[in-house]
Image (cartoon, rainbow, N blue to C red):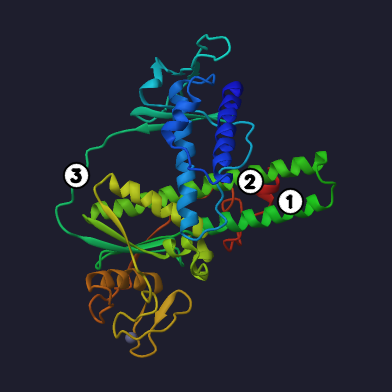
Amino acid sequence: MTEVRSEAARLWNKMVKLHLYFRKRNKKWPTQAEFEKHFARKFSLHSQTVQALIGKFFANIETTRVNRANGDKKARYPYKEKTYFNPVWKGQHIKQELNYIVLPMGIDPKTRKRSLGISIRLPKDIPNGKIVQAELAFGKLLLTIQNIVEVKKPKVDNIAASDLGSIHLAVVTDGTNSLAVVGRGLRSINQGKAKVLAQISQLQSRCEKYSRRWKKLQATKRKILRKTQNQTANLLHKAANEIVKYCEEKEVSKLLVGDITEINRNKKKKASRRLNQEMGVLSLGVFVGYLKYKLAALGIELETFNESYTTKTCPACGHKHKPKGRQYHCPKCGFVGIRDEVGAINLLNKYLNNGTIKPQFLIPKGKLKYLRPVKLKGFAKRSSPTDTGQPSIHSLSAVG
Ligand SMILES: [Zn+2]
């Protein structure tokens, strides 16, 4: 496996060099087909693997080109010299024999002999479907499994709106019933992580860089990062499932989400403070991604919609002010509501009224069904009885 991964890196490095050569001399960039012709039969990899890697390289080039054209001057074309690179196998070249996956190799350009393929035993609990891609990473095999599901179209045109990531992880409403998914766990994961990482950095500052002790602490850091990443992904999946369940029960055909994730990705505006409270901007994007594909499997569309003023406007009288805390109090008409529900209801209102929030059109009932997506292990559970959402540090230092 190491040999194959280093051979893939050899191909990648050659592609990087060749492309750089053309760019530096202001020559016409070679096409993907020209690259395929040039690199064919020169590597001890399956011809389809070579093609897949060339495809990946060109996708990379294209993304950078678009980013640079859009003004991101920091975007760089591939330049790093790799020691290892993940080789990729696609479609019908992946063979399955009993519970083994066989990844074929190509003809070695030196010995002119076909190398043996790599066979790896698959786990028993592998999801149903056809393996369409296999990527050999460091110490793990990443599989893409395709499972075609028949999508049933919702009968009625039912629209729901959601407010993501301010106080609750998400509030979703169809105008009548609202559901809140509480993301308290997410905050403790992130706070716990930040605290422990800071502690480790402090310990590291007291020892010599790259010393044995320092490396051990560095490994602990990585372990914590991996653990928190898994915990976050798990929590976001569960939360997304709850929202999908709600949409299915209420026969929703379209779910609206605010466009705040897009704004932040383009970096045109400063990341808003409300996003940083519960989750990073990054996890919010990931969360929307999970929602999108999970909803798509049921034929429910996810649409982003401009959410400006949705949390500020009073749904009863239309007065605008910035709410403080969890409640929305209207200083003009005295309306009281739950802030995130107001946000979700107003987004729906705005969408149904072509971009303006119409007063009295939809009034939040103030009755939220609360759901906590997942019981936390590790961080919150082991905290002291006087838990205030602060995670325990003891549980983590045990890792190191
Ligand atoms: Zn009002």
In the displayed structure, 392 sits above or below 315; it is above
**Helix, strand, or loop for circle 3?**
loop
Quadrant showing the C terminus: top right
Identified by mark 3, the residue type is Lys
Left or right of residue 223, residue 44 in this image: left
Residue, disc 2 = 224
Whichever of labels 1 and 3 marks the residue nearer the N terminus, that label is: 3
Q: CA distance from mark 1 to mark 2?
A: 11 Å
Depth check, mark 2 against mark 3: the one in front is 3
Residue, disc 3 = 152
Question: Residue 312: x and y, percent?
Answer: 39, 79
Identified by mark 2, the residue type is Ile
> Residue visible at 61% across and 62% down?
386
Left or right of residue 232, residue 318 in this image: left
Quadrant showing the N terminus: top right
**Helix, strand, or loop for circle 2?**
helix
Asked if the residue under mark 2 is in contact with the one under mark 1, i.e. CB atoms within 8 Å, the reply is yes
Q: CA distance from mark 2 to mark 3?
A: 41 Å
- Residue 16 visible in the snapshot: yes
Residue, disc 1 = 200
**Helix, strand, or loop for circle 1?**
helix
Q: Nearer the viewer, residue 90 or 63?
A: 63
Q: Nearer the viewer, residue 235 or 306?
A: 306
Identified by mark 1, the residue type is Ile
In the displayed structure, 221 sits above or below 95; it is below
Whichever of labels 2 and 3 marks the residue nearer the N terminus, that label is: 3
